[in-house]
Image (cartoon, rainbow, N blue to C red):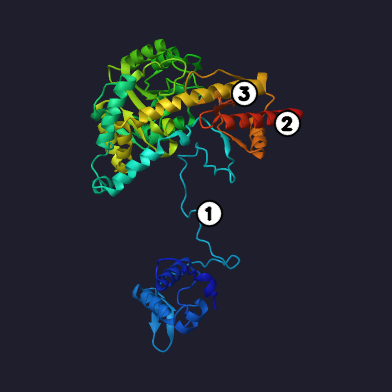
Amino acid sequence: MLPYKTIIAIDRASGVPLYLQICNEFIKEISAGTIASGLKLPGSRKLSELLEVNRRTIISAYEELEAQGWLEVKPNQGAFVSSKIPITHGRPLAGGVLYDHKEQSVFDLNDKLDFLEHYRPPDAAKPELVIDAGYPDVRLAPLRALTRHMNGIINGKRSVKLLDYSDNFNGDPVLREEVVNYLAETRSINVSVDNIMITRGSLMAFFNIFQVLLKRDDRVIVGDVSFRVANDIIRIAGGNLVKVPMDEDGIDVNAIEEACEEGPVRAVFIMPHHHNPTTVSLCAERRMKLLMLAEKYRFAIIEDDYDYDFHYNSSPVLPMASSDRSGSVIYVGSLSKTVAPGLRTGFIVAPTNFVKELSRLSRFIDCHGNMAQERAIAMLFEEGEIRRHMKKALKAYRVRRDLFCKLLKEKLGELVSFKVPDGGLAVWTTFHDSINLDQLRETTLKKGLLISKSVFSDAEGNRLNAIRMGFASLNEKETERAMDILKESVDKLLCQ
């Protein structure tokens, strides 16, 4: 007899009736071939004893299985697995425990995503100290106010409308109106709600933009050291990356012009403020020339302005979208970097006809979004909470930047080179060739400090001995401890 007590798993704490749990377990095991077609099952009394349940529970389970066609009850003989069930290959019991997890699919996979890195699960024991790639400190976010508004929405009259299906594929109209006002006040971008789409962060924005914008093998210009995730999104959409040099003034616009003269260019992806990963900003002269080239060669400028609000030394240069008069710029912003990553709220600003195309695609990807959260965020804008948060965060991050860079120089000296960033949330740090970054990460992790694992390469594919080191998510005490661990780890590597 099969070990039914092992095969048929029962969760007595579950809200699912026991007879239905037993029925479902039988169906699963018959489908898998563990319980074979035509096999006689134990009598209801015997099985009730094995599973330690009431006999009536087993009778109800058998009746349900018979009604669904899985069992045949033969008078004076008993219950049998239906002979009409196709014979499948039985699977062996592994130590008395059965697992449903499948390692391998029966169908073949295509190779369209082979260029992407496979997902790497996070470290099992993530330490409290982390030097990330440049994330905000969630502890500073206006979470109490957000929670208050979310509770008011869920428990109020608006909940039915905001939690039901909607035709607002571009996002909550109230939040879009608030974004319009905010962009006009802070960035001199003067648009209407018809130019705005709300997305689940900037990555969804890029994915939708390039899916709509690109045809197979369209050329897209990026910096030679650029945001790898955006590059991958472009390639997923069928784009052909054209890499041009970056320097201390940003992307080389003359090289972009040369690329345009060589053949059609569909788009240029740029981060004018605090470029990821190098943190440089595009100078005003190059911004204006790039706008002129876009109009002349009729390509789109995808302007990723993920942390415009965090500029420390002077007022930031206005976004290119504020100077766009020809409809060339598609502007992307995000609250995920400025407030909290988990909010997953970004926005696209683009010509109305392009937003309409995005909307056609969005209904198949994110047809409703999170209207309740979007409305709560809109209320944060309305009452000035977002602006107050930005002001508070800017002050805190400036202090953290200064301390981080001061200690980085004091602790590591000539072993690192970097420029104190004018803005943003990270320092682009190049390490001396004597320091292996992989070994450094392993050493710091053993001491309780996790360092960003991002790997960067130049245009020729040569790995750079440099990383983005985020300072914003660490308070002063955490920064001091992190730098002590970093110095200890570097000293240990150099002594080996």
Within-10-Å neighbours for mark 2: few <14, some 14–19, many 20+? few
Task: Please indicate whether residue 246 sits to the left or right of residue 197 in the image.
Answer: right
Question: Which residue is at a point 37% across and 21% down the rendered structure image?
Answer: 265
Given residues 138 and 222, the one toward you in this image is: 138
Residue most toward the top? 285
For the residues labelled 1 and 3, the Cα–Cα distance comes to: 47 Å
Identify the residue position indicated by label 2 in the image: 492
Residue type at tag 2: Lys
Residue most toward the right? 496
For numbered disc 1, what is the local secondary structure?
loop
Within-10-Å neighbours for mark 3: few <14, some 14–19, many 20+? some
Identify the residue position indicated by label 1 in the image: 103
Residue type at tag 3: Leu
Q: Which mark is residue 268?
A: none
* Res. 286 image quadrant: top left
Whether residue 215 is visible to the viewer of this picture, yes or no, is: no
For numbered disc 3, what is the local secondary structure?
helix
Within-10-Å neighbours for mark 1: few <14, some 14–19, many 20+? few
Question: Which residue is at a point 39% across and 35% down the rendered structure image?
Answer: 201
Given residues 393 and 196, the one toward you in this image is: 393
Identify the residue position indicated by label 3 in the image: 407
Question: Which residue is at a point 62% across and 23% down the rendered structure image?
Answer: 407
Which is more foreground, mark 2 or mark 1? 2
Given residues 74 and 184, the one toward you in this image is: 184
Residue most toward the bottom? 76
For the residues labelled 2 and 1, the Cα–Cα distance comes to: 40 Å
Q: Is residue 372 above or below residue 400?
A: below
Q: Which of the two labelled residues, at mark 1 and mark 3, occupies the earlier sequence position?
A: 1
